[in-house]
Image (cartoon, rainbow, N blue to C red):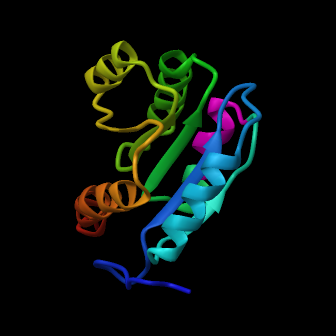
Amino acid sequence: MNAQPPIRGPRPIRVVLTKVGLDGHDRGVKVIAQALRDAGMEVIYAGLRRTADDIARIVLEEDADVLGLSILSGAVVPLTTRVAQALKAREIDDVLLVVGGIVPSAAQEELAGMGIRGVFGPGTTLSDIVDYIHHNAPRLRDYKEQQP
């Protein structure tokens, strides 16, 4: 059941969610997937233990607007950096990258330095995540939709 229609454009916001690295705990990302779906977004859950190159390929193939990484391993900065580099290598620069999991404040600062503002740790409400994506993904989609 879609609770909200897409904000703009001919299709709902498309979100790829995945786990990167060896982290095998996916209960939280599945809860997020359901919340985003219930908010009217199209969610592709790419599963566990994906490599950075796998993720970039999936984002490109799915024409995603948003990529959500779930990382609980403590290696959030190096893993996110690898994924960001893989996206850049494929010239994917119009995807909103968000990160969820255990993210210490020092890591949050490093991610902010990489331009990643959507960082969600334990205690974040589902509505905060949905609102963040609704308010930030459409701007990126506007840019993409204006391209010839």
Residue closer to the observer: 146 or 37: 37
Q: Is residue 58 above or below residue 77?
A: below
Q: How far from the left and from the top, in percent, is residue 8?
A: 28, 78
Q: Main secondary structure of the magenta part?
A: helix
Name the residue located 33 percent from the left edge and 33 percent from the top edge: 116
Classify residue 97 as left or right of residue 25.
left
Q: Is residue 90 above or below residue 47?
A: above
Q: Can residue 1 be found in the magenta stretch? A: no
Classify residue 145 as left or right of residue 56.
left
Looking at the rendering, which quadrant does residue 119 occupy? Answer: top left
Q: Residue furthest front?
A: 123
Residue closer to the observer: 94 or 147: 94
Residue closer to the observer: 50 or 132: 132
Q: How far from the left and from the top, in percent, is residue 33?
A: 58, 60
Regarding residue 91, the answer to whether it shows in the image is no
Name the residue located 48 percent from the left edge and 22 percent from the top edge: 81
Q: How far from the left and from the top, in percent, is residue 100?
A: 49, 38
Name the residue located 31 percent from the left edge and 24 percent from the top edge: 114
Regarding residue 59, the answer to whether it shows in the image is yes
Q: Is residue 119 above or below residue 76?
A: below
Q: How far from the left and from the top, in percent, is residue 17?
A: 59, 51
Q: Quadrant of the C terminus?
A: bottom left
Q: Quadrant of the N terminus?
A: bottom right
The segment highlighted magenta reads 50-58
Name the residue located 29 percent from the left edge and 69 percent from the top edge: 145
Q: Is residue 127 above or below residue 120?
A: below
